[in-house]
């Protein structure tokens, strides 16, 4: 039977004293500029992760205000940065309704949306017993916040007991400089600190603290949930965790420059065909820090440069620990560039950079600490549930009304004409995950902007795209996510919106075209 983390909190006091000595903060005393630094790891792939860059910046001091900011956007994909200050809890987090959101009470709900940054500022942002739930969404940044004591049983409950949980066709999430903590294990009502399941991909967790929990986090909810992966964990500090640091079921993970202290039962658990590249980590005062555990479905690892300081290993049996002399049993190719700190300096570097309230400092890749350049942001305004058009919203007549339309193969029950009928309840959907739809006119027409509006329930499904001159085939613009797209004014008789990547099923409710 597994021992409860709560019963070992006193035993972990030495590790916590070490954390204090290394400057790991429990609160967030420092001001942070919204969207500081740049994403790293797998969050840079699949078109990249920019969050709310380029959009409006609002300030929120309650969970309800966070939901109101999401619901106040022109669409579910309109970029927004939400600066959060204060304690967010059940008492101040209510459901807010709107066409650009799908929220719920008692949880920060990022559902069926895209292009959002949530960043802690000022005296700090603490989500107290309140989880953050990301579902059917893409291009999300969460930075400089503390999420603590989220329960799945007892009272109050939130987010199935996960501090941050992602599920159902999630793409491109960067979680950075966060503190995720519990006060025990499953018997005390807690679950995972950082969970991903049901087709969640291209995620990075960086410069964060995960502590005092039975479960650090997982990729894949069961041995059959193998659609997740491409996750990077770097410069994180795991302290007093029973297991799942993380648990990998299928998929690929890159795990480097993390500091593990007091992994009580097992650590990185690669199983069900998962492949983990494990580089230059520092494992300390822990047990069975790498291997395949609690299953006979083998996983794999490539190891290099790690330090094992007072690590104990079980004998092989029903479990398959990688030690006491871990050797690689696979190779993992990493598609992005990165710099490795030497494992010996990881405790110091991670101790000075990881967690909320550390000034968003990062490693320079050579065992030294630096502060990243802040991304300029607009002056924050108060969050309000009243929709506010963005400055780039097209003006003038929608030229698609009364025009013609065609495209690639369409899904059953949909029509090309649905994208030009002015009705958001009807839509065109491709027969596959990608496809194209066009607007055409009987004579040459000047166009400089289009607005792609997704149908309700499918917001965020459109990933990468191209806008093509249907007369010549020339690309006018490319990018990711629905919304307003501008390009040099072009005279043509046909314009095509080509979806080249998606999560879930793309549904285009309106393909609006404008001269200006």
Image: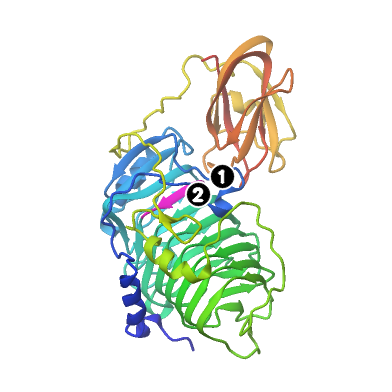
On the image, numbered disc 2 is attached to which residue? 39
Do labels 2 and 1 touch, CB within 8 Å? yes
The colour scheme of the drawn protein is: rainbow
Residue 60 lies, in percent from the top left, at: 29, 45
The mark that comes first in sequence, 2 or 1, is 2
- Classify residue 229 as left or right of residue 103: right
Residue marked by disc 1: 48
> Does the rendering let one see residue 97?
no
Q: Residue at x 62, y 72 (%)?
A: 270
Position above or below: 491 against 255: above
Q: Give the Cα distance between marks 2 and 1.
A: 8 Å
| Element type where label 1 sits in the image | loop
In magenta stretch: residue 141: yes
Question: With 333 as the anchor, is 278 left or right in this view?
Answer: left
Verify whether residue 328 appears in magenta: no
Please identify, in this view, whether the residue under mark 2 or under mark 1 is nearer the observer. Answer: 2
Main secondary-structure element of the magenta-colored stretch: strand
> Regarding mark 2 in the picture, which secondary structure is present there?
loop
Q: How many marks?
A: 2
> Does residue 253 show up?
yes
Residue 122 in percent (x, y) is at: 26, 49
Q: Nearer the viewer, residue 304 or 44?
A: 304
């Amino acid at each position: 039977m597994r021992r409860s983390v709560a019963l070992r909190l006193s035993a972990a006091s030495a590790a916590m004293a070490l954390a204090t000595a290394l400057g790991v903060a429990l609160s967030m005393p420092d001001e942070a500029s919204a969207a500081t630094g740049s994403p790293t790891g797998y969050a840079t792939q699949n078109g990249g992760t920019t969050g709310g860059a380029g959009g409006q910046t609002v300030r929120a001091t309650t969970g309800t205000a966070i939901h109101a900011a999401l619901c106040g956007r022109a669409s579910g994909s309109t970029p927004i940065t939400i600066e959060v200050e204060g304690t967010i809890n059940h008492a101040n987090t209510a459901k807010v309704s709107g066409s650009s959101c799908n929220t719920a009470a008692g949880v920060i709900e990022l559902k069926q949306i895209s292009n959002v940054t949530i960043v802690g500022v000022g005296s700090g942002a603490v989500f107290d017993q309140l989880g953050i739930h990301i579902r059917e969404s893409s291009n999300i940044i969460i930075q400089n916040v503390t999420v603590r004591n989220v329960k799945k049983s007892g009272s109050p409950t939130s987010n199935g007991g996960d501090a941050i949980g992602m599920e159902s066709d999630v793409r491109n999430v960067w979680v950075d400089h966060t503190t995720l903590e519990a006060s025990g294990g499953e018997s005390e009502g807690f679950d995972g600190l950082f969970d991903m399941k049901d087709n969640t991909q291209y995620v990075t967790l960086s410069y964060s603290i995960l502590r005092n929990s039975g479960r650090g986090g997982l990729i894949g909810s069961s041995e059959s949930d193998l659609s997740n992966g491409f996750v990077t964990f770097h410069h994180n500090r795991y302290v007093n965790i029973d297991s799942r640091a993380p648990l990998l079921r299928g998929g690929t993970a890159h795990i480097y420059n993390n500091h593990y202290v007091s992994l009580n039962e097992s650590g990185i658990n690669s199983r069900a065909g998962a492949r983990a590249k494990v580089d230059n980590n520092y494992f300390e005062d822990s047990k069975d820090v790498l291997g395949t555990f609690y299953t006979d479905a083998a996983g794999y690892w490539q190891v290099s440069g790690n330090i094992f300081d007072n690590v104990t290993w079980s004998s092989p049996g029903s479990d398959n620990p990688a030690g006491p002399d871990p050797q690689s049993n696979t190779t993992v190719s990493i598609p992005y560039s990165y710099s490795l700190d030497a494992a010996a300096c990881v405790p110091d570097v991670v101790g000075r950079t990881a967690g909320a309230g550390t000034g968003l400092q990062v490693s320079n890749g050579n065992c030294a600490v630096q502060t990243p350049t802040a991304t300029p942001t607009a002056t924050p305004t108060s969050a309000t549930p009243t929709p506010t058009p963005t400055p780039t919203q097209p003006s003038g007549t929608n030229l698609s009304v009364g025009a013609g339309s065609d495209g690639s193969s369409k899904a059953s029950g949909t029509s090309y004409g649905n994208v030009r009928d002015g009705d958001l309840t009807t839509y065109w959907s491709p027969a596959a995950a990608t496809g194209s739809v066009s607007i055409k006119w009987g004579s040459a027409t000047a166009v400089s902007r289009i607005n792609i509006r997704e149908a309700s329930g499918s917001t965020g499904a459109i990933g990468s795209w191209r806008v093509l001159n249907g007369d010549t085939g020339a690309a006018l613009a490319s990018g990711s996510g629905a919304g307003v797209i501008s390009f040099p004014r072009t005279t043509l008789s046909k314009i095509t919106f080509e979806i080249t990547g998606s999560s879930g099923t793309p549904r285009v409710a309106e393909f609006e075209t404008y001269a200006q």
